[in-house]
Image (cartoon, rainbow, N blue to C red):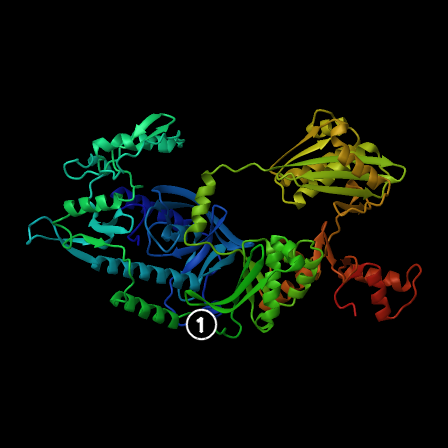
Amino acid sequence: MISGGSTDGDSNRARKARSRRECLEVDGRKRDEPVISFGPEDLRGVSLPHNDALVIQARVANYDVLRVFVDNGSSGNVIFKEALGEIILPLTLGTGDLRKTVMTVFTVIDAPSSYNIILGRPAMNEMRAVASTYHQKIKFPVRGHVGEVKGDQPSSRKCYGETVRVDQKKARNAGKEKEYQEGANEGEVHFVAEEEQEVVEVEPGKHIRVARDICPSTRELTGISSQVAEHKLNILPGSRPVKQKKWHFGPEKDKVIEEQGYHQIPLALEDQDKASFITSGGTFCYVVMPFGLKNAGATYQRLMNLVFYNQISRNIEVLRKVQKFGWDDRCEQAFHDLKRHLAELPILAKPESGENLWVYLSATEFAVSSVLVKEEWADQKPIYYVSHALRGAELKYSELEKIALALVIIARKLRPYFLSHPIVVLTKSPLGRIMTHAEVSGRMVKWTVELGEYDIEYKPRAAIKAQALTDFLIEMIQPVEKVVWRVFVDGASNLSGCGVGGVLIAPSEEKIKLALRIDSRVTNNEAEYEAVLAGLQAVQEVGAARVIIYSDSQLITQQIKGMYEAKNEKMLKYLGLITAQAASLTDWSIEQIPREKNAEADTLAKLAASMSDISTREVLCFTQLLLSIDEKIPSIQKSSWMIPIIEYIIHEKLPENRAQAAKIRKQAPTFVFLNNVLYRRSYQGPLLKCLSEDEVAYVLREIHEGCCGEHLGGTALSRKAILAGFWWPRMN
């Protein structure tokens, strides 16, 4: 651990500078900073009693880093990585509006550790943070308020357990030393640790164990003298030589052939021409014994017996391949070890009331499986396993649908656990976003509604030790592959209306076809602008960052590029919309192409404009009532009931009250947020527009007593509102 006094140094000059700075800071300190205190309410969620270190999760350079150890006794901030030096990175603590970021100097060292980062006094003082290990929490001032970060007790205990196991392993290895004698000196004893020994294979099935320091490097071995050992071929007298075909080897094997073996036994001179072969580099013959011969092992064994005659059974152990099985003491010990292991197999655990349970999901081509676990100290213990073999149409599900199916199956199987415990689903797939935010359809809608009654939270699967920081450092130096989407767009305007066609081509050459009808009178140029806007919106929906848009309209492409000047008021509005729409893209451009190369988009635009029935499922068909430049974004009252749901759908922000948070998490899958409007899903019907309190009063007044009003009762009035496409809470 890094400890000591001030980080400014202990010289006279450093002490004087520190004294002057402290005087200035005392005179200029802020009077309006909030009071930071800890009380009994800060102990919620903390397992007592405990002696756990304070381990938190922080955000370093826009990356979430786990296992961050807060050490007030450390005089520096440390990052553990295979490098040395210092680096300045932004450090962020807190969430939401109570988030604070400071530039922090980290010392990068190469040392084993259970932690990824150590936050010492410099970072804590820069944050003006106060840490309490008893309350497992850090508090710091943020713009007149107090931000906080809670500690992660399971991670703290896991890190402590790993540190203890490493220390115990080092102690055991230090005691595993083996005695051996070197040379003929019986009184000289050397100790060689087990990790300093290596097993050398003398021939297939036979090994010897020797110390590494008595094995010279391969370059120091010049070969075996023929006077020590020599291999002879056992050839039947009178046999005729056989003409060899040309052998073809790779470049690596050709290089090996040209070099002689460093430890090979020489082949008898009279037998060398009998082991010749032809290659692309010429005719070669073996001058050393090849191991492919049947009697090569016997020759090598004779050599080993001669060389290590004085060491065998003293400091060299010969491991011979046992041909016949015999039950000995080692077999008996292995049998008892197996019995003890089977007796200590992990059993299914019983969860405590109200504690969080964790679900891991997995899917393959033919089966899905899941496991429900609980965390106890630093270990995870299984509660139940579920596996399911895919059959019929399930085999054609996408990978994401298979993951969702695994979650649905375990939820049905373990319904009592899901109803009485908060569930955390850990997966690398974007399952949480699909089940709570995206506009899903088909079977995913049914599964979303079915899982909506449970308190389920989706989190990415945690990384292995130091993996999060390692990936962050690697990604900073690795080049990012540029993935570009191509979009072909075209607009058409005729007496029937305006149509927009688009073809999105992914980097994998997969196509997404789009047809949009606009029920408004527009010109051809306006239709072309609408096509570009529709293309930009489509690529953002699929998550593309780099896009090239192709259009056959010279005017539109040149105006967007800035080559032509747009004087019409509508054209200027369209240019502003396109600039705002493309602001979220990393890189994009628009190019003009001939009309014949844009035939597919042109056909889709004409079909949409002429109100032709597009029956194929390969084309996504939509209808837009107004022009993009005429659309008004409705404002939502700050006190509306929709605000918490919209904040959770967009920003995944939940209220602090646990009961309200669980309620919103269950309700969110039944809502969709499209074009700044919140909609309620209906059973086998269209989306219902959600209304605020003032809008509800206006709609009810119009239905009840307005134009064509029928003066209906309460129940009939609410049903009439639903048929009109509206929804709000407590309609009944």
Residue pointed to by mark 1? 347
Of residue 512 and residue 248, the one placed in the foreground of this image is: 248
Q: Residue at (39%, 62%) from the top-left corner?
A: 158
Can residue 407 be seen here? The reply is: yes
Q: Secondary structure at mark 1?
A: loop
Q: Residue at (26%, 44%) from the top-left corner?
A: 295
Q: Is residue 510 left or right of residue 346?
A: right
- Identify the image quadrant of residue 543: top right
* Vertical position of residue 314 compared to residue 628: above or below: below
Q: Amino acid at mark 1?
A: Ile
Where is residue 456 drawn, in percent x and y? 59, 64
Q: Is residue 348 left or right of residue 732?
A: left
The 10 Å Cα crowd at callout 1, few under 14, some 14 to 19, many 20 or more, is: few
* Vertical position of residue 28 compared to residue 603: above or below: below
Where is residue 255 drawn, in percent x and y? 34, 30
* Vertical position of residue 138 compared to residue 339: above or below: above
Q: Residue at (83%, 60%) from the top-left corner?
A: 698
Of residue 169 and residue 2, the one placed in the foreground of this image is: 169
Of residue 121 and residue 346, the one placed in the foreground of this image is: 346
Can residue 652 be seen here? The reply is: no
